[in-house]
Image (cartoon, helix red, strand yellow):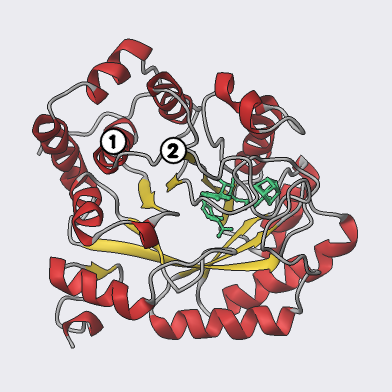
Amino acid sequence: MQTITIRHDWQPEEVSALFALPLNELLFQAQTVHRQCFDPNEVQVSTLLSIKTGGCPEDCKYCPQSAHFETPVKASKLIDVEKVLADAAKAKEAGATRFCMGAAWRSPKQRDMGDIKDMIKGVEALGMESCMTLGMLTREQADELKGAGLDYYNHNLDTSEAYYKEIITTRTYQERLDTLDNVRAAGIKVCCGGIVGMGEGATDRVELLRTLANLPEHPESVPINMLVQVEGTPLNGTENFDALDFVRMIAVARILMPASYVRLSAGREQMDDSTQALCFFAGANSIFYGEQLLTTPNPSENADRALLAKLGMRLEGETPTTSKNAA
Ligand code: SAM
Ligand code: DTB
Ligand code: SF4
């Protein structure tokens, strides 16, 4: 079997050339790489929960949770540990293997760290993987979360460094990279990706994927989000992003980061089955599972089970014979 090469020296022209391939050629290359590292019929599923919603001091132009914009999201405090663990148990029952907890913070406050660590310990005790996304972390905070048993930290670069300034003014790209370094140094697995459909150009998509692939280590998980447009956010009303360009984004991510999980993330509620099927063929092998993302809708578990059954796919960890989606 051909050995897979993990590269960290992707050049702009090489990545642009992948995007420019005829779609069939690009999909064939991506599926070939995918099969060298993964079972093509398996999908890893994580369930999301917003543990602290809205009122965020950051001004990310896509986000309904920013306090800078009038959106339908109602702000609330950090929710109780018991409620989080009850939701995690339900997600496990439904088939999720990872529970991802998100907070609308610039960075966690020390006073909240006790509850955060209890949530991590509780999720681990259920036998699930834990993931948190809480904003920027210092090295000390990353060490503290690692000490509680945290498996993954999600912190997205969102777009290219050049376009970042158009989207967020309250923090820098370098601060995002510094948090990723802190998470990595603490020994936590990295979940890092971005959003397309924010009015960025093709070069910004090339640069986002190139930045991710040229990190010292590839993120173990790479979420590719399609912008979910929410009333009141500055990006609401942006021209819809072409579905096949989204498929290309997944395929190039797969080729650049062969051994990483590429997550078909936000935006599935607005996508038809054929687009999602093409994303899986392009190398997506992970999704958010459960009827809510953080504040916006996601397909229901039943709808996803039906889609996976139609595609002859199964949840990671389920054997073909015990697959609940066969029912
Ligand atoms: N506040 C923390 C932060 O920004 O890192 C954690 C939560 S934040 C909501 C997590 C990620 O959700 C963002 O980095 C962004 O990539 C994604 N996101 C937020 N709003 C979105 C939207 N409307 N459409 C697609 N993705 C979105
Ligand atoms: C990621 O890349 N996408 C998720 C998760 N990481 C935290 C969040 C998507 C949020 C979509 C908008 C919302 O539901 O508020
Ligand atoms: Fe706050 Fe995160 Fe939303 Fe930005 S993406 S406004 S940091 S919750």
x, y percent for residue 241:
37, 39
Q: Residue 293 versus residue 3: which sits nearer the camera?
A: 293
Instruction: Work out which quarter of the rendered image holds the N terminus and state it.
Output: top left
- Mark 2 lies on a secondary structure that is strand
At x 15% / y 38%, what residue is drawn?
27
Q: Amino acid at mark 1?
A: Asp
Residue at mark 2: C-beta within 8 A of ligand 1: no
| Left or right side of 79 for 317 | left
x, y percent for residue 188:
59, 50
Q: Which label sits on residue 35?
A: none
**In the rendered view, would you say 241 is above or below 71?**
above
Q: Is residue 322 visible?
A: yes
Q: Is residue 221 visible?
A: no
**In the rendered view, would you say 189 is above or below 234?**
below
Whether label 1 touches label 2, CB < 8 Å: yes
Q: Amino acid at mark 2?
A: Val
Q: Which residue is mark 1?
A: 245
**In the rendered view, would you say 117 is above or below 216?**
below
x, y percent for residue 28:
10, 37
At x 40% / y 82%, what residue is drawn?
94
| Left or right side of 115 for 148 | left
Q: Which residue is mark 2?
A: 196
Label 1 packing within 10 angstroms: few (<14), some (14-19), many (20+)? some
At x 22% / y 70%, what residue is drawn?
307
At x 78% / y 51%, what residue is drawn?
67
Label 2 packing within 10 angstroms: few (<14), some (14-19), many (20+)? many
In which image quadrant can residue 285 be found?
A: bottom left
- Mark 1 lies on a secondary structure that is helix
| Left or right side of 233 for 310 | left
Residue at mark 1: C-beta within 8 A of ligand 1: no
Q: Earlier in the sequence, mark 1 or mark 2?
A: 2
In which image quadrant can residue 250 be found?
A: top left
